[in-house]
Each structure stands twice: as C-alpha cells, then as structure tokens.
Amino acid sequence: MKLIRVENYEEMSSYAARLVEQQILDNSHSVLGLATGSTPLGLYGELIQGVRERNITYRDIQTISLDEYCGLSSDHPNSYRYFMNDKLFRQIDIPLENTHIPDGTAVSVEAECERYEALIDEIGPPDLQILGLGTNGHIGFNEPGTPETSVTHCVKLEESTRTSNARFFKDLDSVPTHAITMGIQSILKSEEILVLASGKKKAPAVKRLLAGTVSEDFPASYLWQHNRVTLIVDKEAYSLAMAEKE
Ligand code: GLP
C-alpha cells in the first residue's frame, strides 16, 4: 500500500483528482469505481472543474458505484443515485446511461445483486476504484464481519454506520436499515484502488488500516491483499498512526 500524506482535505482532493484525470487521459474509455459520502465531494468538485477548465471529457467513461441504500428510489434526495447525479454526473459530460449504481428499489434484492455483479464483470472491473473509509473500517457498505469472498450483496447496516450517516437524513429513524454493496471480491477485482481519508474522525481507522493486520473485523484491511492500492491521508487522519510511529 502506497501512502501519500498531504496537509488537508483540499490537498487530498486535488491529489486524487490528478490521479483520476491521468487515468482518463491514459484511456478515454476508462471504467471508474466511485464512492459516495462526504470524503470524495472535494474530489468530485475538482473533476467538475477539470471538465470546465482542463478539457477533460467523460463522454466515453463508464462508472460503477459501490453501493446504494435499500428502499430509496433514484429521486429520493438521500439515495446514492440522487447524490451521484447531483454532485457529479449532471455536472460533467458523462452520458447518464454510462453510470451504474445498484437499484435500491429492485423487487428482488437478490436478483439485483446478481445483475450488478455480472455488470461489473461485463463492463468492468474498474480501472481505478475510489474508496472512502468508514469509521468502523467499512469500505462500500461492507461492515465488520464481511467475508473476504463476498461479492455484491445486501447488508444490514451497523448502528454506528446508521448513526454516522444520520447527518444526511431528517433523523436516525429515516436512515435505511439495509443496503446493497459491492463485496470485498468485487472491489479487489479493480486494477487500481485509491483510498481517501480526511479528518480526526478517521484517525483511528487509518491507524488500524496502516497496522497492516488483515482481519474480517476491519474490512478495509483486505486491501492489503491488492498490490496497487494508494492511500491518501491528510494530517488529521494520519495523526494517530503518526503518534504510534514516534
Ligand atoms: C458510507 C458509504 C461509503 C463511504 C463511507 C465513508 O457509509 N457507504 O461508501 O465511503 O461510509 O463516508 P464519509 O466519506 O461520509 O465519511
């Protein structure tokens, strides 16, 4: 795992944007794996600027998103489809049909998971996968205890995850209890993985990830099994790992 230490959130976002844009310049038909949450928002802002100011085009890019809440439709403001359309897709020149996200309203969740995993194999795997880091070490919505062999599946969200994501909802009760997420194997299929972590809240998770012990209790640790992972951390997110080294 390659570690890149930067000063703050803005530097993390622009560093990540440079890597994503380089990928697009190298291959205009790239497949990007995308994450939701607060962490990649700055990166997405930079990518939007790239279209406007640096002639970057997403015309032939495909995207595969990691996860979606069960029960929320694409026009629900808290669905990840809505988030991605709003924060990125509608502000760049990507055809919406090139953007893929699990359908949280599918009648059969099981069939939807199978369809999505087949899609990853068909158009993917991503050339570059962006990941945020849950405070409990989750990636996508792969909560602690997720087996290494998992592919796209439905998960029951941990209370800590629901509480941490409640800030986007009216109240905790409105946060869905289940989600569809790409599994650990689906994520590890990617050619290259970029993990972003910013802020004090992520410092314990970054410290545990960098300790390097692979464990089911901490799903991000499976990333040690991939040979092209870059972790970009800002000063606050790295603070506890740094204290350990001193
Ligand atoms: C969320 C999402 C993940 C995200 C992570 C961190 O629950 N399912 O895809 O990467 O948790 O979120 P944030 O970036 O808001 O801290």
Image (spheres, rainbow, N blue to C red):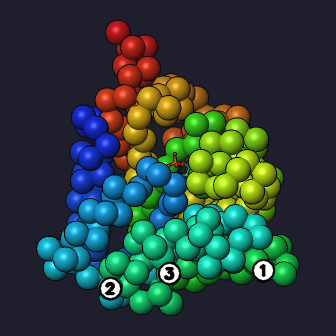
Pick whichever, 99 or 119, lies toward us: 99
> In whole angstroms, how far apart are the C-alphas of marks 1 and 3?
17 Å
Which of the 4 quarters of the picture holds residue 41? bottom left
Ranked by sequence position, the earlier of labels 3 and 2 is: 2
Tell me residue 31's x, y (percent): 43, 75
Tell me residue 62's x, y (percent): 44, 81
Which of the 4 quarters of the picture holds residue 168? bottom right
Please report the residue visible at 23 percent of the width from the left and 77 percent of the height from the top.
51
Q: Are discs 3 and 2 less than 8 Å apart at CB?
A: no
Please report the residue visible at 33 percent of the width from the left and 58 percent of the height from the top.
43
Pick whichever, 178 or 181, lies toward us: 178
The answer to whether 223 appears left or right of 69 in the picture is left
Amino acid at dot 3: Thr
Asked if residue 104 shows in the view, the reply is yes
Tell me residue 59's x, y (percent): 33, 88
Q: SS of the residue at dot 2?
A: loop
Report the disc number at residue 106: 1
Q: Name the residue under label 2.
A: 93
Q: SS of the residue at dot 3?
A: strand
Amino acid at dot 1: Ala
Please report the residue visible at 72 percent of the width from the left and 55 percent of the height from the top.
175
Q: Name the residue under label 3.
A: 99
Pick whichever, 216 or 92, lies toward us: 92
Tell me residue 238's x, y (percent): 38, 28
Disc 3 packing (10 Å; few <14; some 14–19; many ≥20): many
Q: In this view, does 116 lie above or below 39?
A: below
Ranked by sequence position, the earlier of labels 1 and 3 is: 3
Q: SS of the residue at dot 1?
A: loop
The quarter of the image holding the C terminus is top left
The quarter of the image holding the N terminus is top left
Tell us which disc is closer to us: 3 or 2: 2
